[in-house]
Image (spheres, helix red, strand yellow):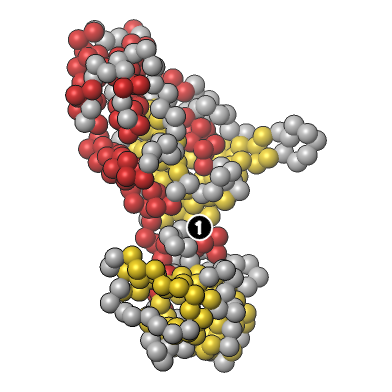
Amino acid sequence: MKVVLQNLTKIYPSRDKGPDVTAVNDFTFEIPDGKLIGLLGPSGCGKSTTLNLISGLETPTSGKIFFGDDDVTNLPPENRGIGLVFQSYALYPHMTVLQNIMFPLENFKGKDRLSKEEMKEKAMEAARLVQIEPYLERKPAQMSGGQQQRVAIARALVKRPRVLLLDEPLSNLDARLRLQTREEIRRIQRETGITTVFVTHDQEEAMSISDQIVVMKAGVVQQIDNPQDVYDHPVNLFVASFLGTPPINVFDGEVRDHMLYIGEDAVMKVDLEDRKVIVGIRPEGFILDENGPLCCSLTGVQVMGRDTSVVSSHPASRNPTVCSIISAENKVTGDTVRFRLKPFKTILFADDTEQALDYSVLE
């Protein structure tokens, strides 16, 4: 099911004579049929509000929402054909797993009404999909967090929704369970082919399972693209800084006579006119070289198996430390460390607007 958001805006009136709050501002986007879209951004950016608008739990101030060719803007949630999974599992504690999964089917009326056998068959099918068949007679309290989340997903899937909406569904899980469950969500989405919107503030989560990600800030869409292109080609400094673990290293820089300077270090030739710039370098964008042009003061070395994290400082850095990820085969000693830079991991931004600049490296 294709989902189209057309100039979607949600404004909350002020409660204390202050300015109104624009949670979502003129959001236009087409979610392709059968794709998993990640809504990503910091707390308060409007991603959950967008999800609530799609679900019908919130009414837009202006704009329209289409499921396929159907205008569902004013349609109540129960008539939209959605499956919704919350951050809290919201399972009924007095019911078994099987009863929890079957519950949405019991609300079907008229020609859609199912017999008990049909409901059980559909519930079993959903349980198999999320791999929780051995636990059908258990109560939620007898299950782990990851298992309860699978029950919540099965309950959302059992009625074969047109659109599946996931609101930070992994936030309550530990690190290992988060990894396992997000892989399960991706597998389930691919097997069912249901158009899915996944809300998270965790950029690693969004990048690992999404076909496309939407990065938001203060209610405004910053960039929409496939995860790797957003990472490699961020449109502005906010997107570049939000994506990536460890985060991108940010420096004050300047272009003089087609030479890019970070502080006093002339690091590469670029086809830009003289101007001040902001230089973003991904942690994997450093090449250890004793004759490299970028000179940093060594702070520490952290060996992480196959990689080594070199922690250093530089006068032009906007970050407290500079983090460089290099191969563990390299040995780092001394008080200073020198690097060459990988051009495709070095991103330049305008000093005034913080928008990414289009440039090429000169030989």
- In this view, 70 is above or below 2: above
Asked if one can make out residue 67 in the rendered structure from this viewpoint, the answer is no
Left or right of 159: which side holds 299? right
SS under mark 1: helix
- In this view, 230 is above or below 170: below
Q: Nearer the viewer, residue 358 or 98?
A: 98
Q: Residue at x 33, y 80 (%)?
A: 331
Left or right of 222: which side holds 225? left
Q: Residue at x 60, y 79 (%)?
A: 315
Identify residue type, mark 1.
Answer: Phe
- What is the crowding at mark 1: few (fewer than 14 residues within 10 Å), some, or many (at least 20)? some
Q: Residue furthest right?
A: 17
Q: Name the spot of residue 119 as percent of width and height, x first.
A: 25, 14
- In this view, 115 is above or below 57: above
The residue where tag 1 is placed is 242
- In this view, 360 is above or below 80: below
Q: Name the spot of residue 179 as percent of width and height, x first.
A: 32, 45
Asked if one can make out residue 245 in the rendered structure from this viewpoint, the answer is yes
Left or right of 291: which side holds 62? right
Q: Name the spot of residue 335 as percent of width and height, x first.
A: 48, 84
How many numbered circles does the render carry?
Answer: 1
Q: Nearer the viewer, residue 21 or 151?
A: 151
Please identify the quarter of the rendering in which residue 8 is found: top right
Q: Residue at x 65, y 70 (%)?
A: 352
Name the quarter where the N terminus is drawn: top left
Name the quarter where the C terminus is drawn: bottom left
Q: Residue at x 48, y 79 (%)?
A: 298
Please identify the quarter of the rendering in which residue 160 is found: top left
Q: Name the spot of residue 22 as percent of width and height, x first.
A: 65, 41
